[in-house]
Amino acid sequence: MSEYDNISNEIRELAAKLLARGEVDVVIGYKPTALPGRTQPAFAYKPEDAREFVFNPLCVSGLPLYLTKAKPEISAKDRIAIVAKGCDVKNIVALQRENQIRREKIKVIGVVCKGVVGKYGRCDGKTEPKPEDLDEKCRYCDVNTPRDYDYLIGEKIESSPQSKEKEFEEINRIEKLSPRERWKFWEEHFKRCIKCYACSKVCPLCYCNRCIVDKTMPRWIDPSSHARGNLAWNIIRAQHLAGRCTGCGECERSCPMDIPLMLLNKKLERESEELFGYRSGYNPHDPIPLAVFREEDDDEFVR
Amino acid sequence: MKKYFFKSVQISVFRVIRVPYLWLKNMSEQSENKKNESNGEWEPKIIAFVCNWCTYVGADMAGTGRMKYQANVRIIKVPCTGRIDPLFLMRAFERGADGILVSGCHPGDCHYNAGNYHARRRFAAFRKLIEFIGIDLRRLQFSWVSAAEGKKFVTIINEVTDAIRALGPCKEYQSMALEPPKDKVMPE
Ligand code: SF4
Ligand code: SF4
Ligand code: SF4
């Protein structure tokens, strides 16, 4: 039996136990789909529902979305258990930090994860994906063992330290270009955006009931998908996540036009670390950088 | 009494949002006139977002003191730098601004105690993002000008105008397409 079968079994047993004892109302996890190479979110309300749960490198989608906005009927439940990889736990911590969830009503079933398959990677779901099939975020992951959980499934492992140099290679390359070349680079990308808003719908931290793009009085972001409107949209989306994004990569994964949104997110992630010393998703008690200030903040850029 | 209070809050919130919006909306037409005035020679267009309590009064002081500064700047008054959403700046660029100045009270002097501190953090992140996208940071400048610093206001406006004049028009933004690319449209 492979390692992933063991993990899946443990998740099934634990979920069935929690439901049978009446400790939770629903367990959120993954189940296989008819399509090979995919999994989909699954919800168990009764112990026997837990039989379909699996966990393997195809479990890419971020489930914390179901704690807030994705399905109101589920987030309204009093006690929820959720299967979460390290990066999902970061999102849960960030949501807790922003008072979007009550941590005490959630039981986190943390799963030790060695990486999931990338957007265009291939994987049979039985063994670990090959390094070239890994998702970008997993290459630089420092939370293979989740940092916060109520139950842990799998053997604890230490994440190997990764070079920042490599992680930010592409960002450093773009930063070295001239402003005009950078502009061309982004214009080429943003031009393709079709304003489907998948990137914000799938982001666990984009939880406004009414997004700024939906507001029409006044209408700040041009709704047509021409280059100018797209630029405003993509910049404002990134800005609204400045210092909050945990780098889960869901936005880029769900973008149908393959716009490298993670470059923007990671750039701001680095800036928020350098400017404000804050990394989102690690500590539920740190102040959120753009919601607070210090009098001695750097104002070198102000005349 | 209570009713009146809510009404007035509503009206002022509406105005605070509406005024910069209408201003920016009219700007492109104004800019056309500007061009004609100066016989087709290009003149930089600079938008200054200033706070009501310090920089606006500082600018007023420059006026009452009859100090001269280059007439390329259009001032938009907002209650506080904390009210300046990055969206305002994006919209100003979209509508043809060649440069933007954001100016408010010195740290510690904010009329609302902390607005400028919040703004400082917000723009510290935003300008990095804008720079990464490819906008020259000389086009987006920030300053603290107090109510007594009419002179500083004049200097800053002149310096910003000169910098933008040297940079030339913000072509990147202005030449950006206002139509979706043809190949994006689904064939019938
Ligand atoms: S980022 Fe880490 S925890 Fe998340 S899927 Fe990749 S390896 Fe697993
Ligand atoms: S912006 Fe993207 S990477 Fe960041 S938290 Fe949202 S979905 Fe995840
Ligand atoms: S998911 Fe991609 S195409 Fe859709 S709105 Fe976001 S950036 Fe544009």
Image (cartoon, grey):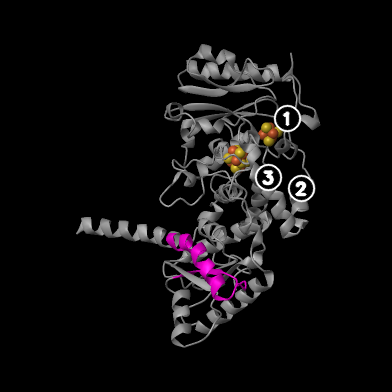
Across and down, in percent, residue B176 comes to 63, 53
**Along the line of sight, the residue nearer the viewer: A190 or A154:** A190
Q: How many dots with numbers?
A: 3
| Disc with the residue nearer the chain's start (2 vs 3) | 2
| Disc with the residue nearer the chain's start (2 vs 1) | 1
Instruction: Name the residue tied to disc 3.
Output: A189
Query: Measuring 67% from the left and 57% from the top, which residue is drawn there?
Result: A274
In this rendering, would A60 be left or right of A287?
Answer: right
Q: In which quadrant of the rendered image does the N terminus of chain B lie?
A: bottom left
Element at label 1: loop
Pair 2/3: label in front: 3
Across and down, in percent, residue A259 comes to 67, 41
Q: Residue under mark 2: which chain is it in?
A: A
**Along the line of sight, the residue nearer the viewer: B36 or B137:** B36
The amino acid type found where label 1 is placed reads Tyr
Ligand 3 under 8 Å from disc 1 Cβ: no
Query: Measuring 50% from the left and 83% from the top, which residue is drawn there?
Result: B150
Q: Same chain for marks 2 and 3?
A: yes
The amino acid type found where label 2 is placed reads Glu
Which class describes the residues within 10 Å of circle 3: few (<14), some (14-19), or many (20+)?
A: some
**Along the line of sight, the residue nearer the viewer: B179 or B138:** B179
Q: Which mark is residue A170?
A: 2
Query: Vertical placement of B55 versus A218: above or below?
Result: below
C-alpha gap between disc 2 and disc 3: 15 Å
Q: Same chain for marks 1 and 3?
A: yes
Query: Measuring 44% from the left and 62% from the top, which residue is drawn there?
Result: B20
Element at label 3: helix
